[in-house]
């Protein structure tokens, strides 16, 4: 596997993380260095670990997981997206906003899994090609980390646009749901709407 091919795979896998990071950043009032590190680190780590798991799992397990991985990603993104939309209408104080921070707790883990689950199949493909997984996993993780950090700050800037700022959490939630629908579409699932 050449470097150009590996970078293309890494960028393709990082696009979901990038999109989710933009939606997360748009829904946040401010983005600290600590929040950037947490989201980027977790997205990068999960993006690096999933291909390793797929590589280790072998054909039998990955075949079963690939039949429903897109549904898992969709349900996780739908859950977080609907919560963001619901929370945007509930108002609340700064303590409540802190609780809704997508770079913390269960939301962080859910988003990390949802954005990286497709990398299982990539790890399996790499194992079938007889390529060692360590270098590809590292590149995939680093690219996801960089794209996530950039996306989070791009989303923050979008969320600060005056007319958009008031609805940024709704837009962020809708974006997550849209990413979930796109994942289903990419796997050949056509929804009735």
Image (tube, grey):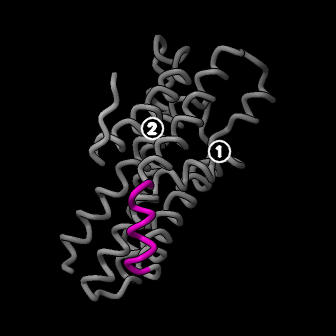
Q: Which mark is residue 107?
A: 1
First in residue order: circle 2 vs circle 1: 2
The percent coordinates of residue 160 (x first, y second) are 50, 23
Relative height, residue 89 to residue 71 (above, below): above
Q: Nearer the viewer, residue 5 or 113?
A: 113
Locate residue 191: give its quadrant: top left
For the N terminus, the quadrant is bottom left
Q: Which residues are magenta?
A: 58-68
Cα–Cα span, label 2 and label 1: 15 Å
Relative height, residue 186 to residue 140 (above, below): above
Q: Is residue 103 left or right of residue 146?
A: right
Magenta-colored stretch includes residue 63 = yes
The percent coordinates of residue 32 (x first, y second) are 63, 44
Instruction: Give the residue at x 40% y 32%.
Output: 178
Instruction: Give the residue at x 43% y 65%.
Output: 64
The percent coordinates of residue 164 (x first, y second) are 46, 16
Q: Which mark is residue 22?
A: 2
Instruction: Give the residue at x 34% y 22%.
Output: 193
Magenta-colored stretch includes residue 117 = no
Relative height, residue 3 to residue 105 (above, below): below
């Amino acid at each position: 596997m050449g470097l150009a091919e590996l970078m293309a795979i890494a960028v393709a896998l990082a696009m979901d993380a990038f999109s989710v990071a933009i939606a997360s950043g748009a829904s946040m009032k401010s983005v600290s260095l600590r929040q950037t590190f947490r989201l980027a680190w977790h997205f990068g780590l999960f993006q690096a670990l999933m291909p390793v798991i797929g590589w280790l799992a072998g054909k039998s397990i990955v075949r079963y997981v690939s039949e429903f991985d897109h549904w898992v990603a969709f349900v996780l993104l739908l859950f977080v997206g609907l919560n963001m939309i619901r929370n945007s209408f509930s108002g609340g104080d700064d303590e409540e906003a802190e609780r809704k921070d997508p770079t913390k707790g269960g939301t962080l883990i859910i988003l990390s899994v949802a954005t990286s689950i497709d990398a299982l199949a990539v790890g399996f493909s790499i194992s079938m090609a007889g390529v060692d997984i360590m270098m590809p996993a590292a590149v995939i993780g680093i690219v996801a980390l960089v794209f996530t950090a950039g996306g989070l700050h791009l989303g923050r800037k979008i969320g600060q646009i005056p007319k958009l700022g008031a609805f940024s959490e709704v837009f962020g939630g809708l974006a997550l749901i849209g990413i979930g629908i796109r994942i289903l579409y990419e796997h050949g699932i056509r929804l009735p709407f």
